Image (cartoon, rainbow, N blue to C red):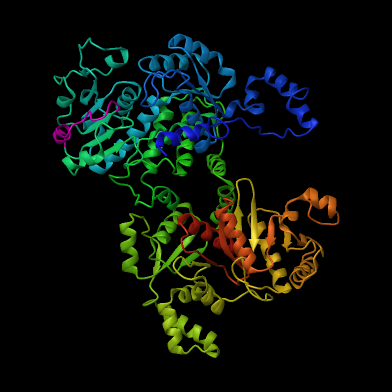
Amino acid sequence: MSKRQDALDYHSSGRKGKIEVISTKPCATSRDLSLAYSPGVAEPCLEIEKNPDMAYEYTAKGNLVAVVSNGTAVLGLGDIGALAGKPVMEGKGILFKRFADVDVFDIELNTKDSDEIIRTVKILEPTFGGINLEDIKGPECFYIEEELQKIMNIPVFHDDQHGTAIIANAGLLNALELTGKKMDQIKIVVNGTGAAGVACANMALTLGANPENLICCDTKGVIYKGRTEGMNLYKERLANDTPARTLEEAMVGADVFFGVSAKDAVTADMVRSMAKDPVIFAMANPDPEITPPDAKAVRDDVIVGTGRSDYANQVNNVLCFPFLFRGALDTHASAINAEMKMAACMALAELAKQDVPDSVRKAYGNIPLSFGREYLIPKPFDPRVLLHVAPAVAQAAMDSGVARRPIENMEKYRESLEALQGRSKEIMRQLINKAKANPKRVVFPEGEEDKILRAAQILLDEGIAIPILLGDRAEIEARIAALNLDLGNITIIDPMNSPDSDRYTDALFALRQRKGVTLAEAKRLVRKNRNYFGSMMVNYGDADALVSGLNHHYPDTIRPALEIIGKQDGLSKVHGLYMMVFKKEVVFFADATVTIEPSAEELAETAILAANKARTFEVEPRVAMLSFSNFGSAEHPLSLNVKRATALVKERAPDLIIEGEIQANVALDPELVAKQFPFSQLKGNANVFIFPDLQSGNISYKLLNKLGGAETVGPILMGMKKPVHVLQRGDDVTDIVNMAAVAVVDAQEALG
């Protein structure tokens, strides 16, 4: 099937187009209807009549943006008209929603009269919290935006101009940092003086570029002082007093090229004529002015960016507009001003210098991503962009006086943005905040692993934990340098030559001498098996928790901890728990990792420990003891085992909401329970599920992870005397950070 047919099928299959409107409030009963419409809707109407600002409280205005276009400059398609441009505007709405949870109505205006567009958009002001102008050709787009900004009291933003300028200049700032050049000393050439080109030039000037060193070109050549052909007000402002008349002449000695023009506009000779370490942002779509391979074939010191995803340094407007509007909407800003645009630019430039999460690397084929010539700009699918750009924009809105609803607690605001990205982020942020209140020492036996080192950087930077790395010091320090991390003050211990090794050897021998461990064996285990050394550290108070297992089998990680630290007194064994995070809820599965065929006693222990752990995550537990039977409907040794376990839990934890034996679907259907099992304690969906054996639990959590889209946090080990948690092979840096936070909170509780 052709790519053309793929695209047509994508837009036409099922419900036509790409968007729909859904209700955010229930409308299933007559009562719901009376509140949603008549007569209940009159109440918010009257409140808004008294105070127009209450529209932000009682309607969707505060999260609603209009994407407005007349279709005169659509992508690389040109003037195709308002109706033909509608698929693009729908797509813009999807990007707003996907990246920043901003709702959009796309509005296509069938007119080329700029004043008619201005009048139409102005009278739409009561509906929207902001206006995104899109795909309107220049120079009309400049006039339309300027006039609307004068007469409207909500943000008006032409993304084709400013989005491109913000991202390209963020990349330029980083390129200059790498090459050691200064903004006020570089020569910049801009080819293409439509919306994006003019905006790129103006932002570079705002950032400190010297106007005398800025040359703009269009299809007729250099825009120089005194030129009359093809000029307008916006080009006049950028005219340069230069003898250059062609792009080829302008490029001689240039440090920077911004291209928003046409395919193949830049030749090899032009690249060859540029200054040392030239920066070329060839942003024409779909084909750049020169491709990165062609530019690099001319010279190896060139830094190249394009608008395409298949090359490094992609200038993609989705890095800007959703997050810029998010910050503007959340402060009820009356405008998007220069200060807010500059804040977005600086935030993007700074983010590119930070360590890139594994989730982003995976989204781009596991290619290496670290600050440098091939990575000047964050990737569009980096979830951190929302958390960096929106707060920066919101702060700039407040500082510049256009915010009508200032954000009082910026840290809480960042957490609310994180929650937009999924329930797991919200849950883990709560736990991380607990950890940060009193960080503990976490030992990592796999101290030379890149992921562990990158996680350690985050743990230190955010104050979540005090990492201790085990391994060869020289190797670890070499990896830290290679990863460009700042871990200068971190504790590194090499068990092979640690002064504590002899003490730990004697202690291990004393613990295990009647378990077949000789003194020589104890010495070997302490020095050569870092899980043993780390477990000894925790056991004797030299560390507060251990996190390991990234490159070890589960039993190899847990065995040393069990032999040295051991399970809590009164427990039959340790147990495993997974937190399963869905879009709107979080549930807990146990045991899916440790006990293969648990007894009733062991199931009861699992249930009580899992319920207690759920409370750690601010979840009030409702426990379902799962079986193929409902309250004796099918008597079998397996179901009877679950029934006995349930009775034990009710005896030992009488205040815990728990039911069993119960089928999984029944545990998630409170109406069915109320009708058929009115005696049940479950009055809502269960959120802690205890599986009758490891096989069913392990299969279930893996199926939900792969087919149900659940994110998993775990396995969380329960029942150890001191905190020990096991990583899984393939865990990424975020998983390691999350598990370390769990370990810190466990240590806080254990130490009191």
478 left or right, relative to 592: left
Left or right placement of residue 48 versus residue 157 in this view: right
**Residue drawn at 34 percent across, 41 percent down:** 310
Where residue 417 sits, quadrant-wise, is top right
Is residue 385 visible to us here? yes
Residue furthest right as drawn = 679
In this picture, is 195 found above or below 575?
above
Which residue sits at x=57%, y=68%?
A: 723
* Left-right relation of 143 to 253: right
Q: Is residue 363 magenta?
A: no
| Percent position of residue 92, x then y | 48, 30
Q: Place residue 205 in its image quadrant.
A: top left
Using the image as rendered, state which of residue 63 and residue 691 is in the foreground: 691
Count how many numbered circles sit on residues in the image.
0
Q: Quadrant of residue 196?
A: top left
Identify the image quadrant of the N terminus: top left
The C terminus sits in image quarter: bottom right
* Residue 263 falls inside the magenta stretch: yes
Most foreground residue, 428 or 104: 104
Q: Position of residue 370 (x, y in %)?
A: 34, 49
Query: At which x and y percent is residue 618?
Result: 65, 53
Residue at 34% x, 68% y: name it: 473
In the rendered image, the vertical position of residue 124 relative to residue 422, given as above or below? above
Magenta segment, which residues?
A: 260-275
Residue 212 drawn at (x, y percent): 21, 23
Q: Is the magenta stretch mostly helix, strand or loop?
A: loop
Q: Is residue 131 above or below residue 723?
A: above
Whether residue 439 appears in this view of the structure is no
In the foreground, 514 or 687: 687
